[in-house]
Amino acid sequence: MMFLKPLGAIILLATSPVFAEPPNPELLPATVNTTSDWDTGFCADVIVNNNTDHTVDWVTEFEPGGTINNLWSASYELLPNGKIRAERLDWNNEVASGQSVTFGYCADKDGDASACVGSADIQPTKRPFPQQVSYAANTIRPTNFTQVQQDQHVRDFYDYWKSSYLLSAGTDTNGKSLCRVAFGKSGSKQDITVSEGQGYGMMSTALMAGYDPNAQSLFNSLWYFSRKYPSGIDNRLMSWKIKNGKIVGGNDSAFDGDVDIAYGLLLADAQWGSSGEVNYRNEATTVIQGILDSTIGPDSHLPMLGDWVQANGSPYNQYTPRSSDFMPAHFRSFGRATNNPVWDTVITNSQAVIDTLQTNYSTGLLPDFIINCNDVSQCVPANSGFLEGPHDGHYYYNAGRDPWRIGLDALLNDDAKSRDQVQKMVTWLASDSGGNADGIKAGYQLNGTPIGNYFTTFFAAPFGVATMLDSNQQAFLNDIYAFVYNEREDYYEDSVNLLSLLVMTGNFWEPVALQTSSLTIEAPTGGGSLIIKAKPSKGWKFKEWAGDCKGTRKKTVVKMNKNQYCTAVFEPKP
């Protein structure tokens, strides 16, 4: 069965019939059935059913799924909510009880990414692409291409990704342009958008600002689309799946989509500031609080699968995480942005689960889903068919993101635990594959037995990120990069590949503009004051003093008197 696409901007034809004043029209339900479908458009029948016990003059409302270019056997108008209101003509005005009447229309499908560009006020970019970030000490980068070549690889891949997956979705009730990330390049998958994709798109467009002159408008349009479809459980979060402009698959959230959306908002705040059309920092704080309230286990402090999970339910609860939801770099940024230490606990508890599993499996690989974490030492891979399929307990199409998610924390934050955890995976994989990228298989059982005997960037590119943390694997990293930088597949693989390429080329950066450290001190014995100096870590620079020392912006050395509390504030180097 073919489905319709979300609404674009409607065009009222001059030939559309004029509305007559109905005597007593009654709103009846309608069913939309696609009758023909092609690359740029489709036609459909709309069947209006009289479910009352009497004959009525009919009127109905429906989601058109595109820009109507012709409609027959009814008159119509576009409503502010994007729906079409259609009603009878003189010759088909009455429909008897239990009967139906049919009219039809043809429509253009969603426009491409250029139609997503709205009228947002464009702010200057603070961290324009390319950034060429210096990551943690003792890390490596691909050396088989120059930096200039690598940056161009990212530009080329981003242009391809944008043209393949970014689609216009019309406007919202406030006239704001909407943009969505399609779930596939063609066919019925293009009718689908998931919150995960919106997060990938928001991160990518924010990071590519400076190269893409429309990045901020695209970002805003992606954000507005996510707001058009909030979760029915926690409306601070996004409903996880949209098809043909309708929420499907349950009106609830998916953890990873919201976390990437929030991270994207932090990137936007760092890139453009929050004084324009969208207050990115405030919106990020709202989403982060929604994530914490509705999708972090109140006792486990582990990620839950979504806001639909009951903390102590069965079989899904706060002790049944998905390994790819362990995103320590994101959590660390959330803690910095909100000054909430709970995110440190989420990181610690997530890393404890990883340690348990890696102790039991020498490959270091993690399963898609994990259960029985009431006692972290008892965490085990989920059973087959736990949530998605027979490989729920294997390293498969969820866990394949783990080396990238965990490795990013080690690269950006120099976290020793994250580094150790991804190095265990890399050490095993380098041996198993012979140090050859084409030896990376499409999924593994946790004992290392391959599942899919084929190559895909989805499993290779995240390992490229992880391999950056092992200076002994330069040749392996170079080989992975050579295999993935120009490989084109489909939505999921390409989106993860783009973000991994941004990391491998040194163009993924910490979004929180300010990082703080604080010190409380008493004056030396006998009174007097103490001289203190702010010394930033590598990649950061001193910005100002806060607390009792506030106002001494230009000096890295200040005097602290007894019982004073001073905070040194740092920001990333440009």
Image (cartoon, rainbow, N blue to C red):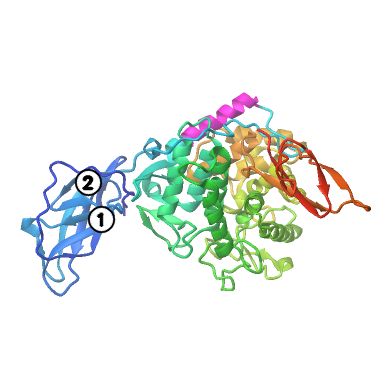
Which residue of the protein is positioned furthest toward the bottom in this rendering? 53
Residue carrying label 2: 106
Describe residue 519's horizontal placement relative to residue 447 as left or right.
right
Q: Secondary structure at mark 2?
A: strand
Q: CA distance from mark 1 to mark 2?
A: 12 Å
Residue 370 sits above or below residue 265 on the image? below
Residue 22 part of the magenta-drawn span? no
Which residue of the protein is positioned furthest toward the front in this rendering? 527
Residue 7 in view (yes/no): yes
Which residue of the protein is positioned furthest toward the left in this rendering? 91
Q: Secondary structure at mark 1?
A: strand
Q: Where does the magenta region start and end?
A: 145-161
Residue 301 sits above or below residue 263 on the image? below
Locate the C terminus and report the quarter of the image it occupies. top right
What amino acid does circle 2 point to?
Answer: Cys
Residue 152 part of the magenta-drawn span? yes
Q: Nearer the viewer, mark 1 or mark 2?
A: 2
Within 10 Å of disc 2 (Cα), the crowding (few <14, some 14-19, many 20+) is many
Residue 480: image quadrant is top right
Residue pictured at 54% horizontal, 60% vertical:
290
Question: Where does residue 492 sit, x and y in percent of width and height?
Answer: 51, 46
Callout 1–callout 2 Cβ contact below 8 Å: no
Question: Where does residue 81 sit, x and y in percent of width and height?
Answer: 31, 54
What amino acid does circle 1 point to?
Answer: Asn
Residue 15: image quadrant is top left
Residue carrying label 1: 33
Question: Where does residue 322 sit, x and y in percent of width and height?
Answer: 60, 59
Within 10 Å of disc 1 (Cα), the crowding (few <14, some 14-19, many 20+) is some
